Each structure stands twice: as C-alpha cells, then as structure tokens.
Image: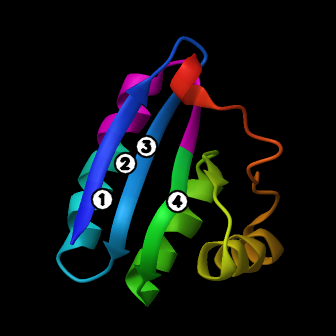
Amino acid sequence: MLRINTIDGERYLTLVLEGSLAGDWVPEAVRAWESVRQAAQQRDVIVNLYAVSYVSPAGRELLAAMCRAGAKLSGTGMLVGALIREINEQEGPIENERAVPDASHD
C-alpha cells in the first residue's frame, strides 16, 4: 500500500510518499508526480520519502526520473538513505533532510 499526499507551499510543492512504492502503486505515483510537476510552476518540487518502507526496481526508476526532472528527494534511514545515495551517484545531486527545508511550514 502507498499513501500519496501533497503539501502545497509558497516556495515548494512537496510530494509525500508513505509505504511501499511497488507493484500497482508505481503507476499511481507516476500520476501523482505528473500532477505535481504541472502544478509546481516555478516552485521547487520535493519528494518526501521519510515514511517509505520498500521500493521496487520500477519504483526506483521512477525516483531516478523524478531526480532527472529536477525534483529533490528527501529522506533518511537505512533503506531510503541508501537509495538516495545510490541515485545520487548515478543521477546527480539529491538533497537530504539537512539540505531541504521543511516544506510543511511553507
């Protein structure tokens, strides 16, 4: 199961993913991502991965595509932290929690 929310701030638009980014949930996340990209206009997009518990290869590809499109991935922990480092090495800089402001207070 994957819960998908957005936080619409003045400077940032945050896509919040919680749960398992796998299976039938990946296409749902793609739709949410496309919607967020359109709504962002000139704002930065942050993808909050703090509560993600599993990412399939298809989910990983989606996150890499988000990064290539300019989104900032944000999260910590063994799974998410390692995933962010891996994508960072392959795709370019990705922000972690220390570099990405808390968009929930925007």
Label 2 vs 3, first from the N-terminus: 3
Circle 1 sits in a helix, a strand or a loop, which is it? helix
Question: Measured from the top left, where is residue 27 in percent x and y?
Answer: 23, 66
Residue at 82% x, 57% y is 93
For the residues labelled 4 and 1, the Cα–Cα distance comes to: 12 Å
Q: Is residue 100 above or below residue 4?
A: above
Disc 1 from disc 2: Cα separation:
6 Å
Task: Residue type at mark 4: give it.
Answer: Leu
Q: Which residue is mark 3?
A: 15
Residue interval drawn in magenta = 35-46
- Say what secondary structure mark 3 lies in: strand
According to the image, label 2 marks what residue?
A: 33
Q: Residue furthest left?
A: 24
Q: Tell me what residue is drawn at x 52 percent, y 59 percent.
A: 49
| Dot 4 or dot 1, earlier in sequence | 1
| Above or below 42: residue 26 | below
Q: Quadrant of residue 44?
A: top right
Residue 12 seen anywhere in this rendered image of the structure: no
Q: Residues within 10 Å of mark 2 (few under 14, many from 20)?
A: many
User: Which residue corresponds to mark 1?
Assistant: 29
- The single residue placed furthest to the top in the displayed view is 10
